[in-house]
Image (tube, rainbow, N blue to C red):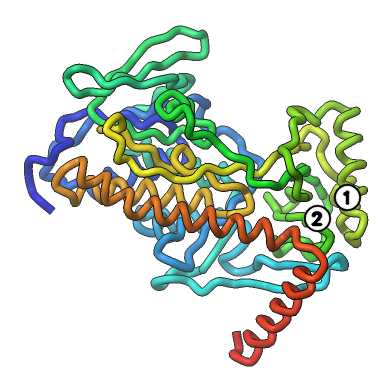
Amino acid sequence: MAASNHFLEDKKIIVVGGGIAGCAFVAALHKLWNPNWRLPEIVVLERNPRDVRHNYSISLHGDSVNGGLVALQQLGLLNETLSHSIFGLRSGQFKMWDVNWKELMSTQPRPWGGLPTGSMRIQRSDLERILVREAERINAAFHRGVECTGAERLANGRIRVAVEDEAGVKNHQDCDFLVVADGAQSRLRAALRPHDDLKYAGAVQIGGRAEFPHGIPEPIEENWGVLLSGKGVCCYFSAVDKDTVVWALSQLRAEPDTRTSVATPDRFAALKEEALRLGSMFSEPFCTIVESTIPSSAFVTAAMEKEPFRHDDPSLERIVFIGDANHAVSAFAGNGANLALKDGWDLAENICYQSSLHNAVAAYDRLGFARAAEAIKSSHQKIDFAHCTSLKDSLLRAGLATGRWFMRIRGM
């Protein structure tokens, strides 16, 4: 690492989006920055207020160098993250069950590089809070309640970002480097890459949060996973805390569902009836979970995704998209947070170690593009796998049984 004359010394960096990817980048840049260099000014523009509540959990992987737990270890935030683990540190595994909750498969990935666990689940709110605190601790300036609607390159090479506050007042901020991390529905991507939008991945989920004040029913009180029917329907379950479970019943559909709200009493009743009908082959506690759903939590969502892109278009000079703003994966991938964390770390690391911004972005692209493309490919396989029927389902179950036998004889 050179000791002087870094290309971003005394420059201004704007990060659009103060979620997982944006805060991971800010924290990583500060951690890796040579103290002999003069710091750039870092401004984070975020639409939401601080500590937004997300009532669901996410998976963090630690079974390869591309896992989010690796990035958190690099950031020095692993122990704090593990302290908020729902599953994965001392108990809990991802499982597949048949319609009668008979276990078809159980996975416990081997930790990579000395990590304490190969996977875990955490409330998204807890992970974001850890990352935001770290970004604020290093004095990144957060401007909340503003939305970024566009960006343009000025004659002097700087980037002008158009912003709008909650009252509708429009303004702008200029910077030398723009990091776009404003999520799958990125306003800036829509402005700068209008034809690069989300695509339907072929499955629709209906679900919600079920509340159990006296304890979550077995076997999902200590595990998370998916029920397979062999009839084109599956249902995913994961605890959010000791009293609450998120469930999502899924089926393949030719077109995405257009329902925008299902939380009104009549629409919720219809949704619950639909879930019970579609999942009628599943044994208890499936019905109990559906019946215990909090009406305001009900949802219908289509699996959406977006292929990654490289920043080789001259119009994107000094602009980099990371996380879901670059490559959105569906819930079936179970990998969005991991990609976001690694994107943030990799971009910061290459900025600190490469000789120019161009080289840093090209090096980041080589890592991030391949990682995201593989995640989307895996997501397609999981969608096909979870909704298979007939002969394909029989072959799948035979394969799972063979896998369990192989693991037993190896003592795994």
Left or right of 229? Residue 410 is: left
Q: Residues within 10 Å of mark 2 (few under 14, many from 20)?
A: many
Residue 400 percent coordinates (x, y)? 70, 77
Residue sitting at x 64%, y 60% = 382
Using the image, determine if residue 178 lies above or below residue 56: above
Left or right of 127? Residue 291 is: right
Residue sitting at x 66%, y 41% = 55
Residue type, label 2: Val
Q: Quadrant of residue 135?
A: top left
Residue 334 percent coordinates (x, y)? 59, 54
Residue sitting at x 73%, y 81% = 401
Using the image, determine if residue 86 lies above or below residue 49: below
Using the image, determine if residue 157 lies above or below residue 216: above
Q: Quadrant of residue 308?
A: top left
* Marks 2 and 1 close (CB-CB < 8 Å): yes
What element does badge 2 sit on? strand
Residue at the farthest left position = 4
The circle on residue 278 is 1
**Mark earlier in primary sequence (2, 1):** 2
Q: Which residue is mark 2?
A: 233
Residue type, label 1: Leu
Residue sitting at x 32%, y 40% = 311
Q: Does the rendering let one see residue 184?
A: yes
Q: Residues within 10 Å of mark 1 (few under 14, many from 20)?
A: some
Q: Does the rendering let one see residue 247?
A: no
